[in-house]
Image (tube, rainbow, N blue to C red):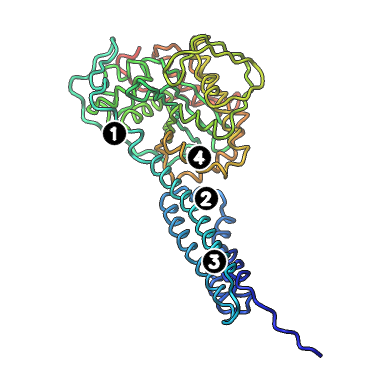
């Protein structure tokens, strides 16, 4: 009986197997100890990650946007690159001495190392982009302080209210309760216009998003940007005798940014803090935080996800719609019915107001937000992550605590986007020049939005505001 010659072992195959799974090439060559040495650490890491993800998927995914976790992922990625490269080279060298290794084998191994490097470069770059975006989005700098010498430094209050000559000492703010502790998530959404020829951001859109923790019901409250006499919170109430901001609410950001003696906070975020405080005081809510989006970022986001589908209930015709680049006006004509918008058209639909009013525009803004939320949750975005991170890095800011993100994500999964309630505090029910009755009416409507029909609505606590009739 003729003895079978020993099977020739392939260095190329061994290196390829260990490229796919470290240690697999060594095991295929019969080197069990060396194979397990490379395989077991990776297997243990994968098993640990899988167990954590299975135990609490939402918290696991949310943790991946924490800066400290991202730093750990970046370092781990470097270690895995080194480990996989070492495993591939070792498998190649484990082949018995004397086995022919042609030029093709060497080329393949080098190609595997380059492929390994390319894989981990992509992972590392994405991790860095995520870290950079998250630290910018949640940082203390906001969108930066107002430029030196800006008009904010000389802006005077509107007639009818007298600034306090000597500001009272700023009281220590009462610590805010943990988010969701009151059974609601309340977030202020600010659409900030930072177009050309403007020296500062402008709060172009103000919407409060409220979600009931128990039921997952949600509601939008549109705040007209031309409201006057919006009450101020305790920390800044002494800025005016009326205890309110006598100008248009969308001018508060600029005014507060330029008056540090009256409005507390860092230079970069003082104006935004003032807006959040005023809207919280107006609605009677302890707002959990705010999310600020530059409107140009909205354009980029819509384009990045392939456009936005909106069922337009009423057509729009605006003969004087200003282009977002500030270089002229166009005739905007959008027909009713199902429409697919690119970013610029979606923004135009949400912002146009000349054919009706700011109040009609608020309705379109809420329709647009609902459509955007539905579309974001209904399509895979993994391949778009780098582009979305870059957009967020330049156009998004929030003061929400990233540690609370798991709870927010879990709550968001229970919200039926199609059933979000839509409200707006507009005339004739709510006048633009607010008085005490209007403010208390707004608070009552906000407090009772999630109450069952027929149940008593909580009575908002009145706040003394000298000068507000």
CA separation, marks 2 and 3?
A: 23 Å
Q: Quadrant of residue 140?
A: top left
CA separation, marks 1 and 4?
A: 32 Å
Query: Earlier along the polypeptide chain: callout 1 or callout 3?
Result: 3
Depth check, front residue: 62 or 468: 62
**Image point (50%, 37%), residue name:** 183
Residue 387: mark in rendering: 4
Is the C terminus in the top left, top right, bottom left or bottom right quadrant? top left
For label 2, count other residues whose C-alpha is less than 10 Å away and answer few (under 14), some (14-19) or many (20+).
some
CA separation, marks 1 and 2?
A: 31 Å
Query: Earlier along the polypeptide chain: callout 1 or callout 2?
Result: 2
Query: Earlier along the polypeptide chain: callout 1 or callout 4?
Result: 1
Q: Quadrant of residue 174?
A: top left
In this rendering, which labeled residue sits more in front, label 4 or label 2?
4
Query: Earlier along the polypeptide chain: callout 2 or callout 3?
Result: 3
CA separation, marks 3 and 4?
A: 30 Å
CA separation, marks 4 and 2?
A: 24 Å
Q: Are marks 1 and 2 in contact (CB under 8 Å)?
A: no
Q: Are marks 2 and 3 in contact (CB under 8 Å)?
A: no
Residue 2 in the image: above or below residue 52: below
């Amino acid at each position: 009986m003729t003895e079978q010659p020993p099977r020739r072992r392939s260095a190329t195959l061994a290196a390829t197997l260990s490229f796919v799974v470290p240690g697999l090439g060594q095991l295929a060559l019969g080197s069990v100890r060396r194979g397990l040495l490379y395989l077991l650490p990776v297997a243990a890491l994968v098993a640990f990650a899988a167990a954590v993800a299975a135990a609490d998927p939402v918290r696991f995914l949310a943790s991946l946007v924490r800066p400290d976790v991202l730093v750990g992922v970046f370092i781990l990625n470097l270690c895995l690159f080194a480990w996989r490269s070492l495993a591939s080279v070792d498998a190649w060298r484990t082949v018995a001495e004397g086995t022919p290794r042609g030029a093709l084998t060497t080329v393949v191994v080098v190609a595997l190392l380059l492929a390994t490097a390319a894989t981990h470069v992509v992972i590392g770059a994405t991790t860095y982009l995520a870290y950079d975006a998250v630290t910018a989005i949640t940082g203390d700098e906001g969108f930066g302080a107002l430029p030196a010498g800006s008009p904010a430094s000389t802006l005077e209050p509107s007639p009818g209210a007298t600034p306090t000559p000597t500001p009272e000492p700023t009281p220590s703010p009462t610590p805010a309760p943990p988010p969701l502790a009151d059974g609601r998530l309340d977030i202020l959404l600010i659409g900030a216009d930072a177009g050309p020829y403007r020296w500062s951001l402008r709060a172009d859109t103000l919407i409060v998003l409220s979600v009931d923790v128990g039921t997952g019901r949600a509601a939008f409250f549109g705040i007209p940007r031309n409201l006057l006499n919006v009450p101020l919170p305790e920390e800044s109430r002494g800025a005016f005798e009326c205890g309110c901001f006598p100008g248009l609410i969308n001018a508060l950001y600029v005014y507060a940014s330029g008056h540090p003696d009256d409005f507390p906070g860092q230079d970069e975020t003082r104006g935004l803090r003032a807006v959040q405080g005023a809207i919280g005081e107006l609605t009677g809510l302890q707002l959990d935080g705010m999310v600020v989006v530059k409107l140009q970022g909205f354009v980029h986001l819509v384009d990045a996800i392939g456009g936005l589908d909106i069922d337009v209930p009423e057509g729009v015709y605006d003969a004087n719609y200003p282009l977002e680049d500030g270089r002229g006006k166009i005739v905007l004509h959008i027909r009713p019915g199902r429409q697919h918008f690119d970013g610029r058209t979606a923004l135009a639909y949400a912002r146009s107001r000349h054919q009706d009013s700011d109040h009609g525009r608020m309705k379109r803004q809420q329709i647009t937000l609902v459509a955007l939320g539905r579309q974001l949750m209904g399509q895979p975005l993994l391949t778009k992550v780098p582009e979305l991170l870059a957009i967020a890095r330049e156009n998004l800011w929030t003061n929400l605590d990233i540690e609370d993100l798991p709870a927010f994500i879990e709550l968001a999964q229970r919200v039926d986007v199609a059933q979000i309630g839509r409200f707006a505090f507009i005339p004739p029910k709510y006048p633009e020049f607010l008085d005490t009755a209007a403010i208390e009416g707004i608070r009552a409507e906000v407090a009772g939005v999630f109450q069952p029909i027929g149940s008593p609505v909580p009575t908002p606590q009145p706040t003394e505001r000298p000068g507000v009739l």
